[in-house]
Amino acid sequence: MSLKEQWIALMTIVRKEIKRFMRIWTQTLVPPVITITLYFVIFGNLIGKRIGTMSGVSYMEFVVPGLIMMAVITSSYTNVVSSFFGAKFQRYVEEILVSPMPNYIILMGFVLGGVARGLGVGFIVTVVALFFTDMEIYSYPVTIGIVVITSVFFSMAGFVNAVYANTFDDISIVPTFLLTPLIYLGGVFYSIDLLPDFWADVSKINPILYIVNAFRYGVLGITDINVGWAFTMVGIFTIGAFLYSLHLLNSGKRLRM
Amino acid sequence: MTTALSIQQLTKIYGNGFEALKGIDLEVEQGDFFALLGPNGAGKSTSIGIISSLVNKTGGKVEIFGKSIDTDFSAAKKELGIVPQEFNFPNFEPVFDILVNQAGYYGLPRTVAIERAETYLRKLDLWDKRFEASRHLSGGMKRRLMIARALIHQPRLLILDEPTAGVDIEMRRSMWSFLRELNEQGTTIILTTHYLEEAESLCRNIAIIDHGKIVRNSSMKTLLSQLHKEVLILDIETPIQTAPQLEGFSCELADEHSLEVEVAKEQSVNELFSLLTAAGIKVTSMRNKSNRLEELFVSLVKANAA
Ligand SMILES: Nc1ncnc2c1ncn2[C@@H]1O[C@H](COP(=O)(O)OP(=O)(O)O)[C@@H](O)[C@H]1O
Ligand SMILES: [Mg+2]
């Protein structure tokens, strides 16, 4: 396929993916906004007032960046895992598999769909957050850079999950048993300085800790960990996920009999 | 002459160890209308799956218009349109969008995609349904939508896997005439079927597949001419108790009102009737005992199993 044809194929998938989550917006865009708004009200506003400050800022200010990232992560992941698994389950993934499209275009198409939903939800949640607190962005390049790369990574993770999944249960296991705990323990709600040394060190093997801290640094200029290191980590994870996803597509594992 | 499809020594062992294809060789010339005939489980869909890269082959080579599906993947796939055995639509997607998206996957610009979608929807009598979600279509409409989708990038080779399974007679006839016309305009067509009349009425060349092996590959004419015997059923006016002795013909009494007579290809039916007349037997009507092709098919499959 020529570059132009590849571009058309890519945009076809991306358009279709965006149309999909827009069509079912009550299932895709509304729930994370409601959940995160509840967090803002309860943790930020009600309980947060009693907590006082965390890492030198009000608890509301502290918790907002983590909650935005939480919405971005789950939305990106969920979009790709449900869309690609749906395609497999209803077999219309075959429409794509019989086409002359190279595998990296297929992957990029679904990933960009996940990124679109992740960033879309992230944007709405940020707008909602502005009703609760003022946000001045400390560093735009860091803030935007980490959101985009995170959303790319979790979209690819969702893709891998979808390739391996055989049932609808299989696409909720990872989010429930892995993603949610990692997010909750990833410094969304507290600074790891509060933890005993041992648990603070254990927390450092959680990639979400780096993501949340890098984003919080972008917004507030405060962090528990080194931001350059955070980018390196997420970058390596993302390249790894890309290569692995591509390998799955190339080998045809669980897609081509 | 250009070869549209060339398959060499194709083998497939599924993950569970089942050997579905045991070394298939097949050549289909450009412009041909070709039947791949075989009983259920023979390996038809597996072969097509490999050609369309939905199934990974275990061994062998496949070329579409000289382009290898391994080394010249994109070019090979552009030549091929595929109508799978089972429906594989996005259920909630409207008919029109399904076609436009499929065109997009092949890299066709959107304006071209929209024009072609209209052309094929009209040709296949689905234009009125263009805004319907695919799950609201009837079985026959879904089949036609699959054909439209397979043609949207105007492939030179169209492969249909049991396209008329579950389609009513009227629709089947109109699908046949659509395919005939397409073939006359130059598209090479391969179809699989276990419906013999379909192969006989549409196809010029035929391969018979059974248990993952090609057991016969020839032109339809040659195949039919090799059928040297037919059994005629003769209904007779006056009941008789024993079969008459007819010189040169083997003859059995099916019941007291009908005779079954074997007629070899070189024998004349006139002769049969003179003998019957001489024996004082009056025939009121006559028919073929069964489809000849069917008999041949059964005998080939039996021979392969033995
Ligand atoms: N995914 C699979 N795993 C294991 N065996 C399979 C698979 N798909 C098909 N088979 C077996 O391979 C044989 C050929 O199947 P298939 O190609 O679908 O036959 P046909 O299309 O001629 O009816 C059958 O015995 C079938 O049970
Ligand atoms: Mg089949």
Image: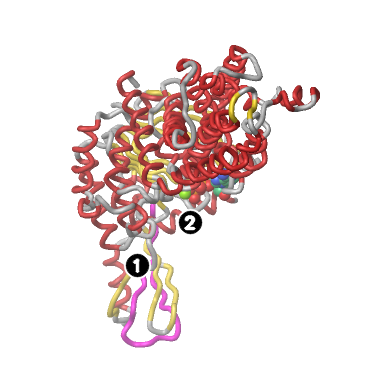
Q: Is residue B81 above or below residue A53?
A: below
Q: Chain of mark 2?
A: B
Some atom of ligand 1 lies within 8 Å of the CB belonging to the residue at label 1: no
Q: Residue at x 21, y 32 (%)?
A: B112
Q: Is residue B233 magenta?
A: yes
Residue A232 percent across, percent down from the top left: 59, 14
Q: Residue at x 56, y 33 (%)?
A: A60
According to the image, what is the colour scheme of the structure?
A: secondary structure
State which mark lies toward you, 2 or 1: 2
Quadrant of res B156: top left
Residue in front for this viewpoint, B251 or B44: B44
Q: Amino acid at mark 2?
A: Val
Q: Is residue B17 magenta?
A: no
Q: Earlier in the sequence, mark 2 or mark 1?
A: 1
Quadrant of res B250: bottom left
Quadrant of the image for the C terminus of chain A?
A: top right
Res B217 seen here: yes
Residue B2 percent across, percent down from the top left: 30, 26
Q: Amino acid at mark 1?
A: Asn
- Bounds of the magenta segment: B227-247
Q: Chain of mark 1?
A: B
Residue in front for this viewpoint, A49 or B27: A49
Looking at the image, residue B207 sits to the left or right of residue B113; the answer is right
Q: Main secondary structure of the magenta part?
A: loop
Q: How far apart are the two marked residues, 2 and 1, measured between alpha carbons? A: 17 Å
Q: Which residue is mark 1?
A: B288
Q: How many marks?
A: 2
- What element does badge 1 sit on? strand
Looking at the image, residue A242 sits to the left or right of residue A208; the answer is left
Q: Which residue is mark 2?
A: B298
